Image (tube, rainbow, N blue to C red):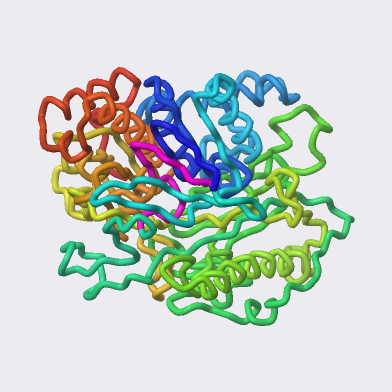
Amino acid sequence: MPERYAEVAVIGGGLGGVAAALAALDAGRTVLLTEESGWLGGQLTSQAVPPDEHPWIEQFGCTARYRRLRDGLRDHYRQWYPLSADARRQRHLNPGRGTVSALCVEPRVGVAVIEGMLAAARSSGRLQVLLGHRPVAATVDGDRVTSVTVEAEGEDPVTVVAPCVLDATETGALLPLAGVEHVTGAESRTETGEPHAPESAQPLNMQAVSWCFAVDHLAGEDFTIDRPEQYAFWREHAPRGWTGGPMLSFTAPVPRTGEPLARTFTPNPDAAGETVVDHRTVGGDHELWAFRRIADRRTFVPGHLASDVTLVNWPMVDYLEGPLYGVDSAEAARHRDGARQLSLSFLHWLQTEAPRPDGRAGYPGLRLRGDLLGTSDGLAMRPYVRESRRIRARYTVVEQDLALDLRPDGRAVRYDDSVGVGSYRIDLHPSTGGDPYVDIASCPFEIPLRALVPVRVENLLPAAKNIGTTHVTNGCYRLHPVEWNVGEVAGTLADLCLERGCTPQQVCDDDDLREELQARLVRDGVELRWPDVRGY
């Protein structure tokens, strides 16, 4: 079996994995980075989700490397796209002008920028990248991981050997392979004390996954896809806890209230008549087309685009029938196929049956844009996974640490061992256990080092959405800038442990080592504290 060696092995090439690799490389380490899909970037690229960020992102509240990523995305458009005069004047360019994010971009632009950030290290040979490889096995010796086996379809397995191993997979896939203590689904209220935790643990109760896709609209054309195999089921199906009728509808729950609300859908609205709304407010129209639009005609010179391009990551494609992990391979495959079938069925409904303001039915001019997502079938390369396996950590962040209604002073718990910051509402999509939305205000929060340190294993670190949070607090720690921050910390901590000959647990316990880690993070542009801002 072929064998590869590096000082730091990063298994999983999502945003956390890329950030971890960059941090370790900048510290002078050799890195081997693997990724199951054909693209690096995870939720930004292979899952096709524009960044979910906080209101202060343009000023503060992210790492310097994450800001380089954001700046790089905008610069890519400025250099290579025919921008309109108005767009060229915009300091904070938002190519898609989506209402959900200040930076809605095409997924393949994210890939180009990430590849650019890694290009020098790949050229020098200090970074090895294995795309299309997933972890299938691990060997351990006591409390240390000694190797990880990854494989790609049709190729011989590869053994990866490294003194430091980082799990940056989308589902924490390395944790069970290496016997790392971890949790899945919802913890019990007895364990966490959280008001929104269930009475008893529910290991298979996880947030919905969504298989996203991108479409444009060419009026007068017909791009109707074949009727999906499961269309009849999804046309009538309303999951437990879902309000508003069947999934194939413009009506879905409002996250903050659970009340059903009919959304509007207007492909390519006139610029002067378009209404921008907050998708989470109660009341008013919720326009789907603009919500996660990734290319807006107004951003470019006239004639460049025949249509806007919008990214469909809407409540109607939240798959709730079961989890993608924690079950046997056959059931997991069935749920993956079910998530794809739901998305294709929703598209077919949009093309053939969706009610229109003019009284007709369907928008046959909706065209899948798989060319922007790197696929031939039009769907994203991978499903959008909101919730991962999570390590049993030295410290687990709980709802009481940051929920606004549980923090009388409007501030989250301040951690002495903070290694980063983040902010987002506690945003839990409906779950496989039948739970409805949980969407509650939270305070801008810190990331405690202890949440990245396993209770036992000495040389494996989480580097994505698999840190010590709960089912509830994962709802605000799972977003793009926080995952990136976690990855950077994991890469920097791996370097410190290699240099000092210590374990992550020892860094937690030794004030001098912890302060040295924090100093290195600050030097590299990681913000450890928030200024005086309150929850939202």
Residue drawn 26% across and 41% down? 445
Q: Is residue 337 visible?
A: yes
Q: Quadrant of residue 444?
A: top left
Where does residue 193 sit, x and y in percent of width and height? 16, 63
Task: Answer with left or right where residue 504 lies relative to residue 354.
Answer: left
In percent of width and height, residue 192 lies at 18, 62
Could you tell whether 423 is left or right of 368 in the image?
left
* Residue farthest along the front direction in this orientation: 1
Image label count:
0
Left or right placement of residue 219 versus residue 17 in this view: right
Q: Residue at x 14, y 43 (%)?
A: 409
Picture coordinates of residue 396 (x, y %)? 21, 52
The magenta segment is 158-175
Q: In the picture shown, does residue 106 fall above or below 78?
A: below
Q: Is residue 140 left or right of residue 239?
A: left
Q: Residue at x 18, y 49 (%)?
A: 395
Look at the image and tell me in which quarter the C terminus lies.
Answer: top left
From the viewer's side, name the closer residue of 285 and 74: 74
Foreground pick, 270 / 138: 138
